[in-house]
Amino acid sequence: MSKKRGRHSAEQIIKKLRNADAMLAAGKSVGEVLQALEVSEATLSR
């Protein structure tokens, strides 16, 4: 059986965006941030 994937809540999205801002400010590359947050480049462009 495959695991059903759900959507993130608004709170989870805000937390990920704040983490991404902090990581970028610390000098991480966009690729490193995406990998750390387990987000695809396609999701980033939404």
Image: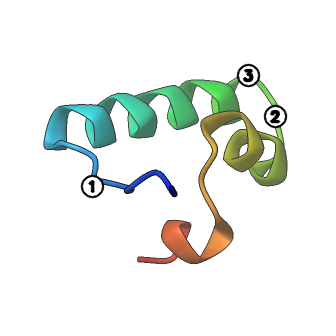
Q: Quadrant of residue 40?
A: bottom right
- The dot on residue 28 is 2
**10 to 25, vertically: above or below:** below
At mark 2, the secondary structure is: loop
Amino acid identity at mark 1: Arg
Q: Name the residue under label 1.
A: 7
Which mark is in front, 1 or 3?
A: 1
At mark 1, the secondary structure is: loop
Counting from the top left corner in percent of width and height, residue 30 is at: 75, 51
Q: From mark 1 to mark 3, how far is it between C-alphas?
A: 28 Å
Among all residues in the image, which is located at the extreme left? 10
Q: Mark 3 points at which residue?
A: 26
Amino acid identity at mark 2: Lys
In the rendered structure, are the residues bearing label 1 and label 3 in contact, judged by CB atoms less than 8 Å apart? no
**4 to 26, vertically: above or below:** below
Counting from the top left corner in percent of width and height, residue 17 is at: 42, 40
Residue at the image point whose x is 18% and y is 42% from the top: 9
Q: Judge from the rendering whether residue 4 lies leftward or rightward of residue 25; answer left or right.
A: left
Q: From mark 1 to mark 2, how far is it between C-alphas?
A: 26 Å
In the rendered structure, are the residues bearing label 2 and label 3 in contact, judged by CB atoms less than 8 Å apart? yes
Residue at the image point whose x is 71% and y is 34% from the top: 36
At mark 3, the secondary structure is: loop
**3 to 12, vertically: above or below:** below
Residue at the image point whose x is 29% and y is 34% from the top: 12
| Mark sitting earlier along the chain (1/3) | 1
